[in-house]
Amino acid sequence: MVRYGKKAQQKVEKAIHEYKRGALKSGRGGKVKSRKQAIAIGLSEARKAGAKVPKKKS
């Protein structure tokens, strides 16, 4: 089973919270419209921060 670190969970939780408020923006500044996209942004931020996140499926 895939395991995520606490820091990764916090980043995703923050991204979902911003998405629900309508404040989450994508890379080019457009509003995020899907929940999956919000989760992906949270995981991406967690990876950049060095959190324990499994590798992307390629």
Image (cartoon, helix red, strand yellow):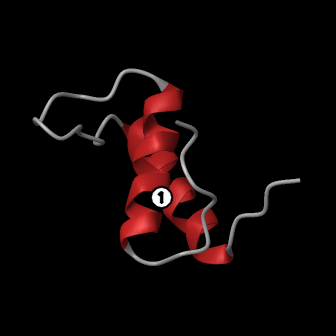
Q: Position of residue 35 (x, y in %)?
A: 52, 29
Identify the residue shown where x is 11% and y is 36%.
29
Q: On screen, 48 above or below 17?
A: below
Residue at 58% x, 39% y is 57
Residue type at numbered disc 1: Lys
Residue labelled with disc 1: 14
Of 16 and 49, the residue lying toward us? 49
Quadrant position of residue 33: top left
Q: Where is residue 24 in the image (x, y as percent from the top left)?
A: 30, 42
Q: In the rendered view, does 10 fall on the left or right side of 14?
A: right
Q: Looking at this rendering, what residue extends furthest in the left direction?
A: 28
Residue at far top of view: 33
Dot 1: element = helix
Q: Nearer the viewer, residue 2 or 42?
A: 2
Q: Say which quarter of the image contains residue 30.
A: top left
Residue 58 percent across, percent down from the top left: 52, 36
Q: Residue at x 54, y 46 (%)?
A: 56
- Residue in view at x 45 percent, y 65 percent: 47
Residue 49, image x and y in percent?
Answer: 40, 76
